[in-house]
Image (cartoon, helix red, strand yellow):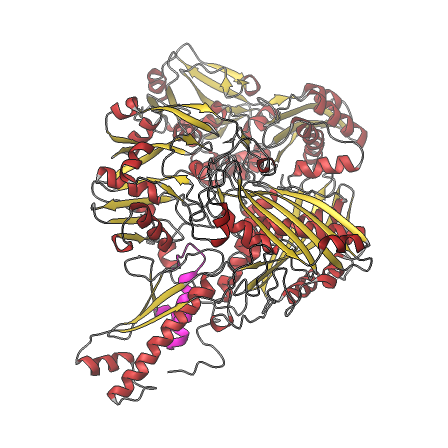
Amino acid sequence: MTPFELIEPGSLREAIDLLDAGDPSVRPIAGGTALMLMMKAGVFRPTRLVSLRSIEQRFSNIEVGPSGELRIGAMTALSVLERSPLVRREAPVITETLRTLSNVRVRNVATVGGNLAHADPHMDLPPVLIALGARIAIVGLSGDRTILIEELVTGYYETVLALNELIAELIIPPQAQRRAAYLKCTTRSADDWPALGVAVSLDMEGTLIREPRVVISAATEKPTRLTAAESVLRGSSMDDSVLRRLGEAAADEAAVIGDASGSAPYKKQLVRVYVQRAVRKALGTPSEKRAASQ
Amino acid sequence: MKPTAGRTVEVGRSIPRLEAREKVSGRAEYIHNMRLPGMLYGKIFRSTVAHGRIRSIDVSAAAALEGVHRVVTGDDIRAIIPNPYYGPAFHDQPILALEKVRHVGEPVAVVLASDPHVAEEAAQLIVAEYDELPAVFDEVEAMTSPAIVHDVLKPAGTFPDLKHLEGRKNTNIALDFKLRRGDPEAAFAKADYVFEHTFRTQQVMHTPLEPMVSLAESTGSSVTIYTSTQMPSFVRIEIARLLGWPENRVRVKTAFLGGGFGAKVYIKLEALVTALSLLVRLPVKISLTMEEQFYTITKHGTTVRIKSGVTKDGRITSRRCEAWWNGGAYADIGPRVTQKSGFTAPGPYDIENVHIDSYALYTNLPPAGALRGFGIPQLVWAYESHTDLIARELNIDPLEFRRKNILRDGRPQATGTIMKDAATDAVLERLAERMNWGAPFDRGSGSIRRGRGIAIGFKASISPTTSGAIVNLYGDGSCSVYCGTVDMGQGSDTAIAQIAAEVLNIPAETVKIVHPDTDVTPYDMGTLGSRSTYHMGLAVKLAAEDARDKLLALAVELGLPAETTPVAALLRKKYGMQAGNIVGVGSFIPSYTPSDHATGLSPDVTPFWMIGGAGAEVEVDTETGHVRITRLINVADAGKLINPKIVETQISGAAIMQLGCTMLERMEFDAGQVTNASLADYKIPGMRDLPEQMENEAIDAQQHSGPFGAKGVGETGTFAVSPAIANAIHDAVGVRLTALPLTAEAVYRAIREKNNDPLEEK
């Protein structure tokens, strides 16, 4: 690591002023769990880091908003999210996902905003949040905006965020009766980066599936909604043939990438199997006992 | 004084480790924490090509960086060490690359600076140019490849069986070990069945959580090396040889090690920091990163071809084993692995006709050495997978087939050495009992299929090696043991204290172990190959007995009752105040007959045998190939247990380590470059990867030649894990994997192939 300037402003606005739209060596740092690894590896060499740890406390709050939405400050540590009774009540799939997200040491310092802005396709939270229809509030010099998380990531470690924009808040719409599940599939150790993450959320009207969302991550360049798979589910009632068609549609449309955690044809098979298992899990009808790590 | 015969008091007691409190409270000493005044940090600049002639090394930008003390290349090293090649088997490894580089990651230059960040920054400014040469990476191809890693072979001279290789050219074969017993070809011709299979293992890394670290301080006429090593005595001898100095001018000290597993044997960074310290006349420290360890030492990838002749009632009459060991660019201890493990390649079976060819090969990969098992796990993987396949073909129960052929005590092993105190059959029977092998077994249903498998392996101790020890009783009667055994987490301090305490009739907790310091502690060959409990154990026992005899003599001289007079009272009477010492010395070397060069036979090839068996129950997800190990049973013959609790953790630790090599670990290479050289991408087992149920047992046994009946156990748990799991997978889903690791994808692909619906290639 080489020397760099570290600034710790007291407010979000000050932090934005210290960033530089034209200089990628100036970066914000929140928990730093990903950035520090990149710096140690020499992949990222900052000239200036703008620490967000002293910005306003409200960016670390979790509360329920006026229309029942969950509002989570971007500086909220993942472990705080994990232990929040509000989150468990409104979106238990998040609570469950966090239990196996990285490890307790990382969760204690990594933040919600950093997790999203980092845009590593292997992250567990983004597919879950996309499945929940979540949005983020972005603050910047040229104005503030709110976008869907599925619009955030544009590619491998790439987002729509300008270099001098920051995520201020995560907004999760009320889930009402919607059901959701996330499955993580690792192919080496249990604590490995996922080879595949699958998040689903859906509503039931009687026996019919309404507004399904199927999102995969890790096996693809970025978290991706599988729209053909969603079409199979939409308006269907759950049975084995629907699940089979779901698996085939998902495997067909998923643009998986082979790497050391598995070849592309194998990851297609994982997609085929895991989307079915995720839907079963969301509906509370898991099939048989599952082998191996999930 | 207590009679030595009969029951023991200190030996056999599960006392907590002596250093446990120091370790958990952060007070234990590690080399990583050491700093000396004026010390410089070294950062290594490494080769980016697998094989090439060095055209130029431009260090000017690095040397010009503010804060850089000096940049050193191989030519600078040669100025103070004219022949700077080291290695235990071959003097083949240059301290820094000279003329050629032979693997990606080979050290080419070093930047020295008082700020490690500056050294790191400067190292990135060095530019080296190479004329690339053809490279060879595969161990079987290396036999005939036109790419030759070393122009001339340079055996170190230490081992007689390497002498015939002196000066050989145009070869990558660093040892061609042969064993010939009976007439295998005639037996194959007569056999009812002949089976042949080939198995492979992958390169893996030891992954000690404390990476290698060494610090040298030189006065010009002497040098002190503080180093995280398993072999302080060897380091001293090798450094003295390189410098042309007497041993007494080289001092080597260790502390606790944050793991070793064979990664820290022989020379690693010690020659480099010594040379650097002599060049700049300041203390120099180099601490490797986790990534750099992948380029420093690995476990041999292997190809093993094994062929058996079997009678129709299931007796193995003939076996031919060919093993190719991928030694990487420098031999390290690979040729020893090739021979010492090679002669056990037919397995713990009573086979009359045996033919073994075991080849150590140079390739352009990072060097390979010994990793917890010294080559045995690779061989057991092959012969126990093969054994199971034969049993299946013959439709004989795998346990029954092993029973028919097991090599029993009193029978000659392939070398001709008679098996003694080797509880092969007892381990097998205990394994069967714990597996409840005869009972019906739930085979699962739907996409979850269950299976179980067993395997058994064995190992000889490397021989002949020696250990010395000193037991020192001070004026107040308190006791220190000076010994060169390195406690790298295996609990040797505690076991040694228990042995000394048993002889001296004092509580083990009161014994102090003086850690290796070659100015203070006597010679010990090294802490490796599960040799310390036996060899050092016997040396310490002899030293303690010597001290006890001297106490008895002193009591007689002073006219005091030997049985009841405390040590302190004896010494006070002798010297008139609290003063003096009673110094007992002991050393041990086992008997040994070297194996005949032409036949590989020897009547006395090892002082003891280690036996390890494993049984696995698995669940296989047929839709994804994921394997869940629901039960893993490890059974070992470790002789009498000095400390049963520590023995159990040694068995379980070794089994879990091998579980990583079996299921998860694989160094991925691209043109010799490791593409997953970090703990983010190279996965070792974590808590959630452990089998749901794991049971470890050391059977009731005696090694009659060992200290109080004990023998080594550090590696035994590794032997049989891999084939036990592969055999269980075969049992569950009917597919045979012949290469490690047993990844979910490999299992899934095999299932698809069996169903005549192969998954498309990558």
State left or right for residue B471 relative to residue B366.
left
Residue A73 seen in this snapshot: no
Q: How many numbered marks, from 0 up?
A: 0
Name the residue rendered at 46%, 72% in the picture.
Answer: B11
Q: Quadrant of residue B750?
A: top right
* Magenta segment includes A93: no
As drawn, which residue projects farthest toward the top?
A142
Front one among A241 and B286: B286
Residue A45 locus on image (x, y percent): 37, 23
Front one among B182 and B402: B182
- Say if B241 sits above or below A63 in the image: below
As drawn, which residue projects farthest toward the left?
B576
Q: Quadrant of the N terminus of chain A?
A: top left
Residue B55 locus on image (x, y percent): 39, 23
Residue B502 locus on image (x, y percent): 41, 75
Front one among B603 and A193: B603
Q: Which secondary structure is most common in the magenta stretch?
A: helix
Name the residue rendered at 48%, 68% in the picture.
Answer: B642
State left or right for residue B475 relative to residue B13.
left
- Say if B218 sits above or below B540 in the image: above
Residue B431 seen in this snapshot: yes
* Magenta segment includes B497: yes
- Say if B474 sits above or below A227 in the image: below
State left or right for residue B295 relative to residue B30.
right
User: From which residue to which does the magenta span run?
Assistant: B485-510
Q: Quadrant of the C terminus of chain A?
A: top right
Front one among B32 and A221: B32
